Amino acid sequence: MQTVPLQLSDVIYNAATQSFEALVTVHDTDGAHSYACAIDAPITMEFEDAAAGLATQAMRRHTHGRSNAAHLPAARAPRRPNRLAGLRRMTIDKFATLRPRAA
């Protein structure tokens, strides 16, 4: 198994969700990939255990993303009708609406 360098940035404990959170960067041959990770854990958990859990989550997301990348079709933007055509029809002549008031 190959060792991949990891970098954990700004590990915090979120008391509202009772979880440890961090931005984990995975460095491999393709470059650096960052993942926002969170693990549910009590505040009494040791930092090393929390860091190991965050690193495991990042590696799972990293390997899962690479294995499915070849199988996913390219994303296409949905086709939209010509929205400007409708706007041109709805344009109101402001001067035409003010002329009766001026008289």
Image (cartoon, helix red, strand yellow):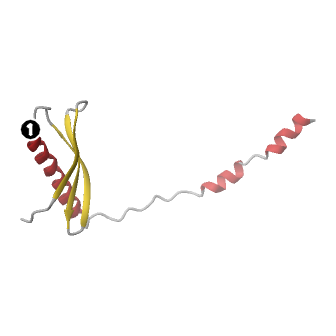
Dot 1 corresponds to which residue?
46
27 or 60: nearer the viewer: 27
Q: Position of residue 38 (x, y in %)?
A: 21, 43
Q: Could you say which quadrant of the image residue 7 lies in?
A: bottom left
Residue closest to the eye, 70 or 21: 21
Structural crowding at the residue carrying mark 1, measured as other residues with C-alpha within 10 Å and reported as few (<14), some (14–19) or many (≥20) = few
Q: Classify the position of the N terminus by image quarter.
A: bottom left
Q: In this view, does 24 lie to the left or right of 77?
A: left
Vertical relation: 13 (above or below) 89: above
- Where residue 23 appears, as percent x and y from the top left, is 24, 49
Please state which of residues 102 and 35 is positioned toward the viewer in this rendering. Answer: 35
Q: Residue at x 9, y 65 (%)?
A: 2
Residue at horizontal 23 percent and vertical 59 percent from the top = 65
Q: Which residue lies furthest to the top in this view?
A: 16
Residue 54 at x, y percent in the picture: 16, 47
Specify the quadrant that holds the C terminus: top right
* Left or right: 49 as drawn, with respect to 34: left
Q: In this view, does 60 lie above or below 50?
A: below
Which structural element holds mark 1? loop
Total tally of numbered discs in the picture: 1
State which quadrant residue 28 falls in: bottom left
| Residue 95 location (% of width, % of height) | 83, 44
The residue drawn where x is 20% and y is 32% is: 18
The amino acid type, in three-letter code, at marker 1 is Glu
> Observer-nearest residue: 79 or 52?
52
